[in-house]
Amino acid sequence: MRIGHVIVPADDLDAQLDFYTRLGLTVRFRDGDRYAAVTDGTVTIGLADASQQPVAGRTLLSVQVDDLDACVAGLVAAGATAAAPVTGPHERRALVVDPGGNPLVVYERRT
């Protein structure tokens, strides 16, 4: 497990990229006008348009795991709730809500 990235809403991706690169972050990846990743070399921030926001308008943590199904099952056993996994172009992910009511994304990369 590792923290994959923090997802930040970005309805205007070009403006958000301008802002975050002016902070000194570098663009790591861009997928059209729907998603871009910027990094300081250690932490990645995912800038996501509405189609890529697991919880509309909320900034949330995204955690990469090796086995999505096993991880989600363990989190549910620990008191979380989880939506059914969805497959995107780059990953398979599930929205999980922790026992305190905080949403996060758990995902595994597609190979």
Image (cartoon, rainbow, N blue to C red):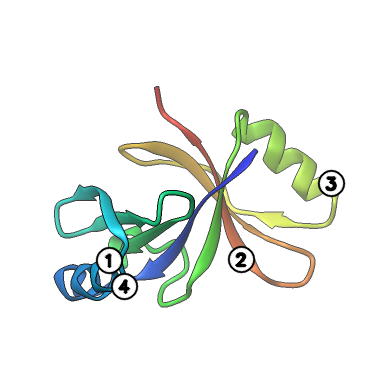
* Mark number, residue 103: 2
Which residue lies under the disc numbered 3? Answer: 77
Q: In this view, does 86 lie above or below 37?
A: above
Q: Is residue 81 above or below residue 67?
A: below
Of the 4 image quadrants, the one containing the N terminus is top right
CB-based contact (under 8 Å), mark 1 and mark 4: no
Of the 4 image quadrants, the one containing the C terminus is top left
Q: Is residue 27 above or below residue 58?
A: above
Sequence-first disc among 4 and 3: 4
Nearer to us: label 2 or label 3: 2
Q: Distance between the residues labelled 2 and 4?
A: 27 Å
Secondary structure type for disc 2: strand
Q: What residue type is labelled 3?
A: Ala
Sequence-first disc among 1 and 4: 4
Find residue 48 and report its horizontal and vertical position in percent.
32, 63
Nearer to us: label 4 or label 3: 4
Q: Distance between the residues labelled 4 and 3?
A: 40 Å
Label 1 neighbour load within 10 Å: few <14, some 14-19, many 20+:
some
Which residue is painted at 74% across and 39% down in the image? 73
Q: Distance between the residues labelled 1 and 4?
A: 20 Å
Sequence-first disc among 3 and 1: 1
Say which of 32 and 84 sits in front. 32
